[in-house]
Image (cartoon, rainbow, N blue to C red):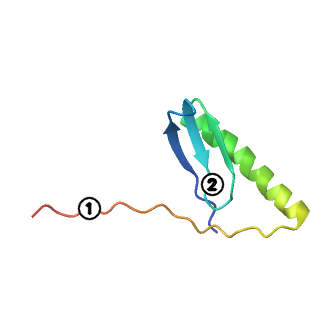
Amino acid sequence: MSDYTIDIFWSDEDGGYVAVVPDLPGCSAGGPTPQEALDQVLVAKAGWLEVARERGYDIPEPRYRPPTATRTAAG
């Protein structure tokens, strides 16, 4: 079973870390540390999914995966 990818990044505009769930439109949260942003977005994700279920909205399958870095040998 796969879960939703969560991206966490520093935002100068927000003055803190932002965590987003790309597969769930509008699902994001912030915090002064990466861990706090993660903790908050997990709460937001649970709320997003609960409301979607209550209202009978389609819930997207986890699909987004960040690109993986590839390394090549220098020639």
Label 2 neighbourhood size at 10 Å, few (<14), some (14-19), many (20+)? many
Identify which residue is drawn at 54% across, 45% down: 8
The residue where tag 1 is placed is 71
Quadrant where the N terminus sits is bottom right
Which circle, 2 or 1, is nearer the viewer? 2
Q: Assign a secondary structure to mark 1.
A: loop
Count how many numbered circles sit on residues in the image.
Answer: 2
The residue where tag 2 is placed is 21
Residue 73 position within the rendered picture, expressed as x and y whole percent measured from the top left: 17, 63
Residue 23 position within the rendered picture, expressed as x and y whole percent measured from the top left: 64, 62
Residue 5 falls in image quadrant: bottom right
Taking depth in this image into account, of 15 and 36 the one nearest to the observer is: 15
Residue 24 falls in image quadrant: bottom right
Q: Upstream in the sequence, badge 2 or badge 1?
A: 2
Quick check: 7 above or below 32? below
Q: Amino acid at mark 2?
A: Val
Quadrant where the C terminus sits is bottom left
Residue sitting farthest toward the left: 75
Q: Assign a secondary structure to mark 2.
A: loop
Identify which residue is drawn at 51% across, 42% down: 9
Instruction: Measure the C-alpha gap from mark 2 to mark 1.
Output: 27 Å
Identify which residue is drawn at 74% across, 45% down: 43
Task: Using the image, tell me which numbered label, if any, was put on residue 8.
Answer: none
Residue 55 position within the rendered picture, expressed as x and y whole percent measured from the top left: 89, 63
> In screen coordinates, is 6 left or right of 67?
right
Identify which residue is drawn at 66% across, 40% down: 39
Residue 17 falls in image quadrant: top right
Q: Amino acid at mark 1?
A: Arg
Residue 70 position within the rendered picture, expressed as x and y whole percent measured from the top left: 31, 63
> In screen coordinates, is 68 left or right of 44?
left
> In screen coordinates, is 5 left or right of 44?
left
